[in-house]
């Protein structure tokens, strides 16, 4: 049975080093520089479409708003073609999908912060794609509810594996 930990708290704690590595990899990009910003977006374009495709193939996950089209539009506005996505396979299990969704949707929060660094004359629809009111809290509550329904620590461990795989995808793309 579940110990006294929520899935969200467990994900946050267990993946903090993974999150830090991804932040460090992308933190080197100067988003105020058009060329470096384009490289940043191309790196994301190697990861996000692959992650979103993996999520779309997983039954039982809540609907999510895809951002890959916004990313492609931003690249096109810069005159940049979208690169081929990296290969990505989520670990088995429903929980791994929840872990990946946690990372993909959580990146919206960071995107909003990064969008502030993008000059007004550069496209930023992708980074500016924020959650709707209460959407992030609703997702986190649904994640915890799914873990509670599963009733095992193994479910949380599988969610952590999915989140780590997704963070690694983004790190490799950088």
Image (cartoon, rainbow, N blue to C red):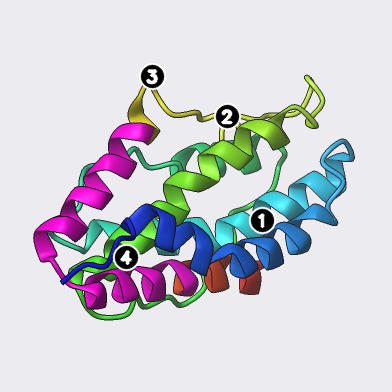
User: Is any atom of residue 157 visible in this view?
Assistant: yes
**Residue at point 63% right, 74% down?**
172
Distance from label 3 to label 4 (Cα)? 26 Å
Q: Is residue 92 left or right of residue 86?
A: left
Secondary structure at numbered mark 3:
loop
- Of the two numbered discs 4 and 1 in the rendering, the one whose residue sits closer to the viewer: 4
Q: Is residue 40 above or below residue 170?
A: above
Tell me the residue that label 3 is attached to: 133
Say which label, 1 or 2, has the lower sequence index: 1
- Of the two numbered discs 3 and 4 in the rendering, the one whose residue sits closer to the viewer: 3
Q: Quadrant of the C terminus?
A: bottom right
Residue 153 occupies which quadrant of the picture?
A: bottom left
Q: Nearer the viewer, residue 47 or 77?
A: 47
Residue 167 occupies which quadrant of the picture?
A: bottom right
Q: In the drawing, what numbered circle is on residue 42?
A: 1
Q: In the drawing, what numbered circle is on residue 125?
A: 2
**Residue at point 36% right, 62% down?**
99
Say which label, 3 or 4, has the lower sequence index: 4
Q: Is residue 158 left or right of residue 104?
A: left
Distance from label 2 to label 3 (Cα)? 18 Å
Tell me the residue that label 4 is attached to: 54
Magenta residues, as a range? 137-164
- Residue 57 pos. (x, y %): 21, 63
Secondary structure at numbered mark 1:
helix
Say which label, 1 or 3, has the lower sequence index: 1
């Amino acid at each position: 049975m579940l110990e006294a930990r929520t899935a969200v708290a467990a994900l946050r704690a267990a993946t903090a080093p993974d999150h830090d590595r991804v932040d460090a990899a992308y933190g080197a990009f100067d988003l105020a520089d058009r060329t470096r910003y384009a490289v940043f977006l191309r790196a994301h374009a190697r990861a996000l479409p692959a992650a979103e495709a993996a999520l779309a193939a997983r039954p039982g996950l809540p609907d999510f708003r895809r951002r890959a089209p916004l990313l492609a539009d931003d690249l096109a506005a810069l005159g940049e073609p979208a690169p081929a996505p990296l290969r990505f396979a989520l670990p088995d299990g429903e929980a791994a999908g929840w872990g990946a969704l946690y990372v993909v949707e959580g990146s919206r929060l960071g995107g909003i912060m990064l969008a502030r660094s993008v000059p007004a004359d550069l496209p930023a629809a992708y980074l500016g794609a924020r959650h709707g009111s209460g959407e992030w809290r609703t997702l986190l509550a649904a994640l915890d509810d799914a873990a509670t329904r599963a009733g095992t620590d193994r479910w949380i461990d599988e969610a952590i594996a999915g989140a780590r795989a997704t963070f690694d995808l983004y790190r490799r793309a950088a």
